Image: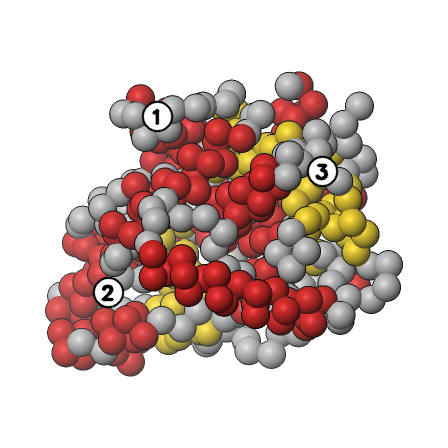
Amino acid sequence: MSAIYMDLSEQFLANGHRFKYYGIVRTVMEVGYEMARLGGVRFVIYSPAHSQFFEVTPRLDAASPTGVMDPGLPPEATPIRLRRSFPTRNRLRDALLRLVRPLVRWVNLRRWRHVPSGAARPVDMTGQILISLGRPKIIADYLAELESRGAAPALVPLVHDMIPLHAFAHRDHKVFTSNYLHDTRKVLSCAHLALTNSLFTRDELLHFSERGYFKAMPPLTPVPLGHELRPTQEPLTRPPPDGPYLISVGALTGRKNLACLMEALRLLHEQGRPVPRLVLAGARRKRTDEFVQQSRFAGIADRVMFFRDPNQSELRALYEGALALVIPSYMEGWGLPLGEALWVGTPGLSATAPALKEVGGDLARYFDPDSPSGLAAEIDRLQSDDADRAAWRDRIAASRDRLRSWKDVANDILGAVRAT
């Protein structure tokens, strides 16, 4: 019988980086943690320096610098990643890569020397079950290498979204979409079973398959992600601000639609209504800074506070102290911040994106992402009606058992894998 392996390559590549708490890396970390606790699953990372998988023993809880789980390898061993395959040929690029690859491999092998003896054991993945929740480009790279050596695993990937196939996804849309399609096609063509992180993502995948984007489609099983925000022992070095505030996590211009939120606050200011503080939590983005500093937001500039790269303890405290989370995205594959806010009992004001409605259900309140005035009205109601706000919080608290834990997610993934 084939062994079940969980791929931690995504977290290995993010080792020591500030993005380890968010998005796909966060999903890998949380599901991996629960699988480690459940037992019956082994863990691997792919080393581009060796072109093979290594079995690792994750560190959990206080033994891990994340406070949750990591692959058990030092940050100094984190490799440089070069794309393995491309959708089109380019003579100049390909020639340069032939020169660069040996140098990068040399650097990665030197970094690998930091791995303690016995911490990573070579493993042959041929025919073994490999659950991978990482990005398509990470998976496609090692599939191309393993396939060339006839060492392909029985792959079970998680598809996070089809957002790159929509025009608003990226400033360099043509190149980004081409690479994404190339990688996702490779992943799906090699998959024995594909998971999706929401019903919406499953429907999107079927939609694009019907339009001819994907020819080889494996069986699909939706496994909605978790709402849970796990408490950790990380230090709370930066407390939440005093006074009433809204929080938005990872809000950017474009698809993340920071414009709607800023315009809603500007409208409240122009109407003479109270304007709560806005905490923008996440990585620093130059374009976000420049957008917020525009002259039309001068009247509310003092209401905006950036909270850069919060750890999990700080993020939890921000949620707990907020009037509400605001998530104005046009599209998401799931929407971790909305689930996390509800998990700790904080109201969520959410755009009407289908995946966000899956996350928030009847516990969130929704607004048209193209209507700043609609969001402004919801914010004004939230901050001015104490009884309504208290009743909303009570309803969220009473519904806690309906929210999904990361253990639920891990069990559903393993159930889907063992049923095939």
Disc 3 crowd, CA 10 A, few/some/many (<14, 14-19, 20+): many
Point 30% across, 70% down: residue: 288
Secondary element at image label 1:
helix
> Front-most of 139 and 322?
139
* Mark 3 → mark 2, Cα distance in angstroms: 49 Å
Q: Quadrant of the N terminus?
A: top right
> Front-most of 366 and 16?
16
Can residue 274 be seen in the rendering of this structure? no
Amino acid bearing label 3: Met
Q: Quadrant of residue 166?
A: top left
Q: Quadrant of the C terminus?
A: top right
Point 37% across, 60% down: residue: 93
Q: To which residue does mark 1 refer?
A: 209
Dot 3 or dot 2: first in sequence order is 3
- Please identify, in this view, whether the residue under mark 1 or under mark 2 is nearer the observer: 1
Q: To which residue does mark 2 refer?
A: 262
Amino acid bearing label 1: Ser
Point 17% across, 50% down: residue: 371
- Tell me if 302 is positioned left or right of 118 in this view: left
- Tell me if 122 is positioned left or right of 261 in this view: right
- Tell me if 241 is positioned left or right of 416 in this view: left
Dot 1 or dot 2: first in sequence order is 1
Residue 125 circle label: 3
- Please identify, in this view, whether the residue under mark 3 or under mark 1 is nearer the observer: 3
* Mark 3 → mark 1, Cα distance in angstroms: 29 Å
> Front-most of 6 and 121?
121
* Mark 1 → mark 2, Cα distance in angstroms: 37 Å
Secondary element at image label 3:
loop
- Please identify, in this view, whether the residue under mark 3 or under mark 2 is nearer the observer: 3
